[in-house]
């Protein structure tokens, strides 16, 4: 008999395909992002219902800064609006919003609303909603290495004490469990510089659906698929050990 895995605690999502969704309809790309925000809300509500502990969205990568400034500005406007308008939802559903990434690169107005939303929701004890903004995993790892090197110089850390646990404490995600499940939409089969350290043992789930078409039923299907997987973390399954 197959051993069923536990429920996922942390689900991370690469929301891809907004641009192609819009193009297919002859719409400007920003319309895809707008529809994508509606999907974000639907999936947040579903995650709360499923009692997921942490939900991480890859909303804006460091590479995304290279997009035309009109698209970057449009995304920043949508993000600011999201951070203001969803405060009610965070309160109603007891959600704590946090963010990872190089926030100092975000426009001041976005930084301000982000800090305010984090502050307003910081005592909420339900879902942790983590938004990766201006985020890149290799850069996060390099920044961790630099901070550890500084602490070695200051004699706060001994070289022989560096291990996975200690290293993890220097990442943006230091307070979070690693993702159990990573979902990527739009049929692309790559990780795009997202949480490379943290997803070492995550289960990966790819769907051809564009993000704006992704629905609660798709999210539930991904969770059901996860539960059927036999997670071994490099060891043997329970059956094989017996
Ligand atoms: C990928 O689609 C999506 C993005 C780069 C942005 C995602 C952002 C949102 C849905 C809005 C903000 C999110 C939150 C959580 C507030 P793409 O533009 O790369 O699509 P394409 O590959 O089809 O061009």
Image (cartoon, rainbow, N blue to C red):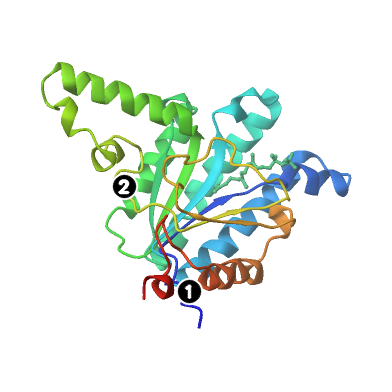
Callout 1 secondary element: helix
Residue 28 at what x, y percent from top left?
80, 39
The mark closer to the camera, 1 or 2, is: 1
Q: Residue at x 89, y 44 (%)?
A: 26
Residue 23 — which label? none
Say which quarter of the image contains residue 139. top left
Image x and y of residue 20, in percent: 79, 44
Question: Which residue was labeled with disc 1?
Answer: 49
Dot 2 crowding, Cα within 10 Å, few <14, some 14–19, many 20+: few
Whole-number angstrom distance, CA of label 1 to CA of label 2: 24 Å
Q: Is residue 189 left or right of residue 100?
A: right
Q: Whole-percent x and y of residue 6? A: 42, 72
Residue 165 left/right relative to 208? left
Residue furthest to the left in view is 155
233 above or below 141? below
- The numbered mark, 1 or 2, whose residue comes first in the sequence reads 1
Q: Nearer the viewer, residue 213 or 161?
A: 161
Comparing 86 with 36, the one in front is 36
Q: Quadrant of the C terminus?
A: bottom left
Snapshot quadrant of residue 126: bottom left
Vertical comparison of 96 with 197: above or below: below
At 56% from the left and 43% from the top, the residue drawn is 59
Q: Reply above or below: 138 against 220.
A: above
Q: Which secondary structure lies at badge 2?
A: helix
Residue situated in front as seen by the camera: 6 or 79: 6
> As displayed, is residue 170 above or below residue 56?
above
Name the residue carrying label 2. 119
Residue displayed at 47% across by 34% down: 137
Quarter where residue 42 is shown: bottom right
For image coordinates 60% across by 66% down, the residue present is: 222
């Amino acid at each position: 008999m197959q051993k069923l895995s536990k429920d996922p605690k942390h689900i991370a999502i690469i929301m891809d395909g907004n641009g192609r969704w819009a193009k297919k309809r002859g719409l400007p790309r920003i319309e895809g992002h707008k529809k994508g925000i509606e999907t974000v809300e639907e999936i947040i509500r579903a995650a709360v219902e499923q009692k997921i502990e942490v939900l991480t969205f890859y909303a804006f990568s460091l590479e995304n800064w290279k997009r035309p400034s009109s698209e970057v500005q449009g995304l920043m406007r949508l993000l600011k609006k999201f951070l203001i308008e969803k405060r009610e939802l965070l309160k109603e559903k007891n959600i704590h919003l946090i963010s990872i990434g190089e926030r100092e690169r975000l426009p001041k107005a976005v930084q301000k609303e982000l800090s305010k939303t984090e502050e307003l929701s910081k005592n909420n004890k339900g879902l942790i909603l983590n938004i990766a903004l201006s985020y890149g995993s290799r850069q996060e790892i390099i920044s961790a290495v630099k901070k550890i090197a500084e602490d070695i110089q200051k004699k706060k850390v001994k070289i022989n004490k560096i291990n996975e646990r200690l290293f993890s404490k220097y990442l943006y995600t230091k307070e979070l469990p690693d993702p159990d499940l990573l979902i990527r939409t739009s049929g692309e089969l790559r990780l795009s510089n997202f949480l490379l350290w943290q997803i070492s043992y995550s289960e990966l789930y790819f769907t051809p659906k564009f993000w704006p078409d992704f629905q609660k039923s798709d999210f539930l299907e991904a969770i059901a698929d996860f539960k059927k997987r036999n997670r071994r973390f490099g060891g043997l399954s329970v059956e094989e050990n017996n």
